[in-house]
Image: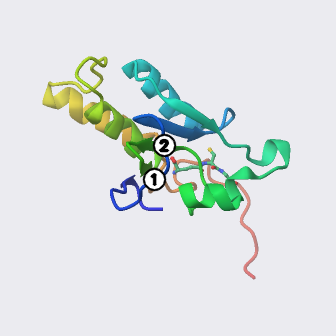
């Protein structure tokens, strides 16, 4: 799923902020930490992945939350926000005024923050770049 909020999708919800996540998922942890740092109250929906063998992320129900079958999904007033790095910035921008401020006001600091948020998203990362080059050359074919 493309990242960002989907205003055109309305999911059942009982709280302003809800999070579909998994305890072992690093991406979920990023969003959980962010929500907690902001001091936002959120309803958590734990989604089992491979660890229990139940593959709840490919259940009929969860595919209505994320047709891409991935966690985390942040839900704001019923609208899903996809991609954890988008969720961090979205939550920080839309948190109520009594939430802790996470977005720097200084443009240079904001740029630095965006750099690290993007870096931790792994989006566009070439998995080969930066790796140690192999010492052997495999024969062609
Ligand atoms: N780029 C996505 C990656 C999400 C992702 O890969 N989530 C993993 C857990 S960390 C997942 O849901 N895996 C389920 C599976 O592969 O079956 C994000 O940052 O939100």
Query: How is the protein colored in the picture?
Result: rainbow
In this rendering, is residue 127 above or below 100?
Answer: below
In this rendering, is residue 41 above or below 54?
Answer: above
Give the image location of residue 91, x and y in percent: 35, 35
Q: In what element is the residue under mark 2?
A: loop
Give the image location of residue 52, x and y in percent: 84, 42
Q: Mark 1 highlights which residue?
A: 123
Residue shown at 71%/65% (left/top)? 137
3D distance between C-alphas at marks 2 and 1? 29 Å
Residue shown at 38%/38% (left/top)? 117
Residue shown at 35%/62% (left/top)? 8
Mark 1 CB in 8 Å range of ligand 1? yes
Q: In what element is the residue under mark 1?
A: loop
Query: On the picture, is 93 further left or further right than 28?
Result: left
In this rendering, is residue 46 above or below 6?
Answer: above
Task: Give the residue at the far bottom of this rendering.
Answer: 141
Give the image location of residue 44, x and y in percent: 57, 32
Callout 1: 10 Å neighbours few (<14), some, many (20+)?
A: few
Give the image location of residue 1, x and y in percent: 48, 62
Query: On the picture, is 13 further left or further right than 7?
Result: right
Q: Mark 2 highlights which residue?
A: 13
């Amino acid at each position: 799923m493309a990242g960002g909020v989907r205003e055109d999708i309305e999911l059942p919800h009982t709280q302003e902020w809800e999070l579909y996540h998994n305890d072992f998922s690093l991406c979920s942890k990023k969003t959980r930490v962010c929500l907690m740092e902001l001091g936002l109250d959120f309803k958590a929906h734990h989604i089992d992945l491979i660890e229990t063998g139940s593959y709840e992320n490919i259940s009929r129900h969860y595919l209505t939350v994320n047709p891409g079958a991935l966690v985390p999904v942040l839900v704001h007033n019923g609208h899903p926000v996809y991609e954890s790095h988008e969720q961090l910035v979205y939550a920080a921008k839309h948190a109520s005024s009594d939430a802790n401020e996470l977005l720097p006001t200084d443009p240079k600091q904001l740029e630095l923050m965006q750099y690290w948020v993007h870096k931790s998203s792994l989006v566009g990362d070439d998995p080969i770049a930066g790796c140690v080059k192999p010492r052997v050359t495999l024969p062609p074919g």
